[in-house]
Structures are given as structure tokens and as C-alpha cells.
Image: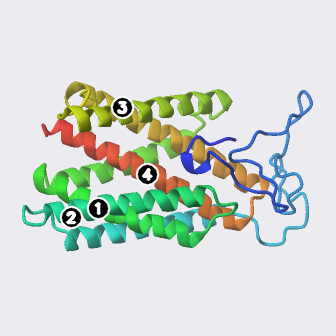
Amino acid sequence: MRSSNPVFSRRGFSRDNGAYAGFGTQQPQAQAGTATNPYATNPYATDPATGMPQAPVRGNAMTIDDVVSRTALTLGTVVLTAAISWIALPVDPANINKSYGIAFGAALIALVFAMVQSFKAKPVPALILAYAAFEGVFLGVISSAVSTYVSPGTVVQAVMGTMCVFAGVLIAYKMRWITVNRRFVGFVTAAAIGFVLLMVVNMLFSVFAGGDGLGFRSGGLGILFGVIGIVIGAAFLAIEFKSVEDGVTYGAPREEAWLAAFGLTVTLVWIYLEMLRLISILKGD
């Protein structure tokens, strides 16, 4: 299953022989009525119908526990560096320009690490954790600013909202209330591209014309686009859950759990930022 998460857009979970399958690739065409296993040549692969190994397992297949542990480590790095930057980079009037400068510099570095990782043939844990660390610096300063100038409770509400979105999508996916298929992925991809392009245009208008640009980040339109951003993030989560499930079922190598952790972290950061902005608008700032 192709994922529309930018981290997974170029490639995906790899077969043991280095060919790409699962994430980011087209599935092989099967004969009518026949299911195709994208990891058929992987010695770790299992039969999705029975759950039994198709070949002797060498103990190196990715498991859900691998994904959970690496995601916890990556998100833990984000939270730790966010907490440190919140304390070390105050956003009071005397330090706000310095703090913002460091925060946006960290965001740019995080983006570079993310892009480098996305073009790597295999996941590089050091790059993923470096991305998480610098992303945490950015989030810590932005969260501190919102807590200081909007409301101390806004950050807690945004965190709780993000957790609720994650839990809700996971439950809906497990109950099969969400069907992730090719049409769903195509729709989410188109919506995400349109959303990002619109936000870029709004930012350019804001830079050159002043104010809030086209008004997509404040007022009624800001609330509408905040909700849309959160819904797109939730759709990314559903696609990633499907991708992880396929990777585990078909026997992706264990190292690919880092890729899953990376993509889930990127999506959760997206949802948190949209949630933070939405709550700020609803509180009147």
C-alpha cells in the first residue's frame, strides 16, 4: 500500500534482496482473483491468510513491537528536546527574537535531515533521531510562545487533542471503519498537495503584503483550514497504519521499523501544530 506521507512517498519497506515493495511502490499485477504478496521473495514473509511463515524465519522480520519501541524513542527525543528548549530559550520580550531565530533555524535543520533521510536507500537511525532532536527545539519554543501569549492551557489541550486523534484513528482502523485503498490514498494525496500549496501561497502573500495574507490562518477561514489540516493528518495516520500492517504481515526487515517511526513522528508533529494553531484561533488570538 502506497503511503502519501512525504517520508514514504519515494520508496517504502524493502525486500531482503534490496528491491522495493510495500510502501511507495506499485504492487505487482496479479491474475484475476489472485492476491499478490509484495514480499513473496522475502525469506521473512508470512502468508497473510494463515499467518504462518512461507519460509524459515531467520529472526530478523519487523514486528509491531519494533515499530512501537522505535516510535517511542523518536517521539521521546522530540519531547525531551522540546522540554529543554522551553526552559533554555524563554520567549519573554528580552529574549524572544533570539529564541525565535534559534527555533526556526532548528526547524530548517530538521527539514534538511528529513529530506536526506527520505532519499536514503535505507533508514539511518542517527538521521531520524537528529531530525527528532531539532524538531523538538522548534516545537518547544513555539509551544512556549503559545503558552505565554495565548493561554498556558493551550499546549496541554493540543497534546491531548493529538493523542485523541491518534487513538481515534487507530481504533477506527482496527475496527475497519476506515478502508485504506488506492482511491483513499489518491484522494488524501491530492488533498495534502492542495493544502500545502495553498498555505505556501498564503505565506507568500503574508510576507509581501503584510498581515495574514489571504486570511487562511485566522478567523473563520483559519478554523476551517485548521480542521482540514487535522483531518489530512488523521488520514495520513490511517495510511501509515495500513503500511505498517502490510510490512509486518509480509515480512519487512526489522530495520524498516525506523522508517515507520520516522513517518509516524512527522505526521504527529503535523497534527500537533495544526491542533495548536486551531485552539489558539478558537481562544481569540
What residue would you read off at disc 1? 103
Q: Which mark is residue 99?
A: 2
Q: Residue at x 61, y 33 (%)?
A: 185
Distance from disc 1 to disc 2, alpha carbons, whole Å, reads: 6 Å
Distance from disc 3 to disc 4, alpha carbons, whole Å, reads: 24 Å
Nearer-N-terminus badge (4/2): 2
What residue would you read off at disc 4? 268
Question: The residue tagged with tag 2: helix, strand or loop?
Answer: helix
Q: Are marks 3 and 2 in contact (CB under 8 Å)?
A: no
Q: Which mark is residue 214?
A: none
Q: Are marks 3 and 4 in contact (CB under 8 Å)?
A: no
Q: Residue at x 24, y 28 (%)?
A: 215
**Left or right: 22 in relation to 244:** right
What residue would you read off at disc 3? 201
Question: The residue tagged with tag 1: helix, strand or loop?
Answer: helix
Mark 3 or mark 4, whichever is nearer to me: 3
Which amino acid does the dot numbered 1 rest on? Ala
Please rate how many residues cluster around mark 2, counting C-alpha atoms within 10 Å: few if below 14, some from 14 to 19, many from 20.
many
Q: Is residue 132 visible?
A: yes
Nearer-N-terminus badge (1/4): 1
Nearer-N-terminus badge (3/4): 3
